[in-house]
Image: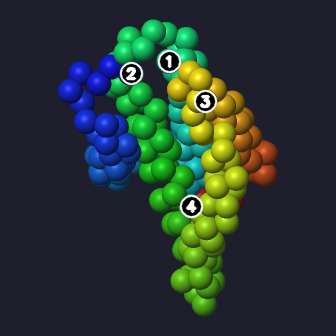
Amino acid sequence: MALHGTPNDLLQNLDPIALIIFVPLLDFVIYPLLRKYKINFSPVLKMTAGFIMASISMVYASVLQHYIYNSPPKSIHVWIQAPAYILVAFSEAFVIINGLELAYTKAPTSLRSPSPLCSDLLSALQQPFVSLLHPCLKTHTLCGCTPHLLSLASLLDADSISVSEIPSMMYPSSLGKKREIWS
């Protein structure tokens, strides 16, 4: 990829930078505007939108990685990866914040502290799975490329798409009504 003076670590920092910009924008502009126009964007719909954004990010990254592998070296600018990082940040703002809010507000008083820990426990259980997938990321010794990375991104995309549909499958009748179960 052509860096054109861009530091390697900058793209990885786009996620937290986008979160710093996007979370206040949601809280002070987008959500009040939706409430003003009486649009019910409940936590379940916010989380569904977040999972859909994560899926779109994975599709974008998979297609981009395909083009990177099939193009001459240094012909694609590094900033073309920025939308994938920014979409992941948007999905985090929708999913993680609303998930923790739901866990806290819907839990009994005695379980308000332990319930967000379930999210951390799931993250901890996810790490061995990531470690098992790590051999897919090793570079090929002959060409210096990572041929399994596209397969891995496609698997993650399929997983994200399937998870994004869970809330709508669990509560299909409530998504169209004025008041949802988790509103």
Helix or strand or loop: what does disc 4 sit on?
helix
Say few, some or many: other residues with alpha carbon within 10 Å of mark 2 (under 14 / 14 to 19 / 20 or more): some
Residue 145 visible, this angle = no
Mark with earlier residue (3, 4): 4
Residue 51 visible, this angle = yes
- In this view, which residue lies farthest toward the bottom? 110
Mark 4 is on which residue type? Gly
In this image, 29 relative to 110: left or right? left
Mark with earlier residue (3, 1): 1
Q: Are marks 4 and 1 in contact (CB under 8 Å)?
A: no
Label drawn at residue 99: 4
Gap in angstroms between the C-alphas marked 3 and 1: 15 Å
Q: Position of residue 18 (x, y in %)?
A: 33, 43
Which residue matches tag 1?
A: 68
Gap in angstroms between the C-alphas marked 4 and 1: 35 Å
Say few, some or many: other residues with alpha carbon within 10 Å of mark 1 (under 14 / 14 to 19 / 20 or more): some
Which residue matches tag 2?
A: 1
Which residue matches tag 3?
A: 140
Gap in angstroms between the C-alphas marked 1 and 2: 8 Å
